[in-house]
Amino acid sequence: MLSHTVLESQQSAIAATAGRVLAGSWKLDAGRAITLNPRERSVLEISQGRVWLSVGARPGHAGDATEDVVLAQGQALVVEAGQQVVMESWYLRGGAPSAVAFCWDVVPAVALAADPAGDWELGVAQPLRDLGCALGQGGRAVAAAVAATLGASGRLAAGLLRFALHRIAPQRVRMHA
C-alpha cells in the first residue's frame, strides 16, 4: 500500500480532492477500471470518490447473477473469497470522472476455536514465511547496492587513471621536444 508522512486528518479538503491518495489507500485514476479477485473474505471501503462495481456470483452459488453497485466515500462492501469484483471510477455530478482512493483488506477472522494447527499456521508458520520473503528481498537489494557501488568505484578509478594519464601525456611531449 502507499503511505504518506502527513496524516490525512491534517490535510485540507482541497488537497484531498487534488488527486492525492489518502494515507493507507490504493488509488484508481479517473476513467480507469481494476479487477479484484479476493482469496479470502475481504472488505472494500471507499476512502475518496465514487465507484461503480460489478460483483460476480459467490462461489457455489451459480444461480446468483452479477450485481452492479455504486459506492461513495465512506461506504464499504464485503466480498466473499472467490468472488470477482470489477471496479471503475464513477462520474461525479460535474460530469467528469474523478480519481478514487480505496482500502482493500481481509475481514478479520473471529477467534479460532482452539485449533492448534490454525494457531501454529497464523502465529508461527505464516510470519516465518513472511520473514523469509522479506529477508530474501532485503538480500537482493543489498546485493544490487553492492554491485552498483563496485561498478561506480570501477568507473571512478578508470576515470581518475584517464585523467592522470591525460595530465602526464602533454608533459612527456614537451620533454622530448
Image: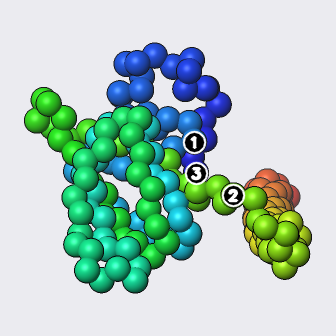
Residue 140 seen from this side = no
Q: Pointers 1 and 3 in contact (CB under 8 A)?
A: yes
- Which quadrant, please, contains the C terminus? bottom right
In percent of width and height, residue 99 lies at 32, 41
Q: Pointers 2 and 1 in contact (CB under 8 A)?
A: no
Q: Which residue is mark 3?
A: 1
Say which amino acid is labelled 2: Val
In percent of width and height, residue 114 lies at 85, 69
Q: Residue at x 45, y 76 (%)?
A: 82
Q: Nearer the viewer, mark 2 or mark 1?
A: 2
Circle 3 SS class: loop
Q: Which residue is mark 1?
A: 24
Q: Residue at x 46, y 67 (%)?
A: 80
Say which amino acid is labelled 1: Gly
Of the pair 50 and 100, the residue shown nearer to us: 50
For marks 3 and 2, the one nearer the N-term is 3
Q: Which residue is mark 2?
A: 110
Say which amino acid is labelled 3: Met
Q: Mark 1: few, some, or many residues within 10 Å (few <14, many ≥20)? A: some
Q: Mark 3: few, some, or many residues within 10 Å (few <14, many ≥20)? A: few
Residue 170 seen from this side = yes
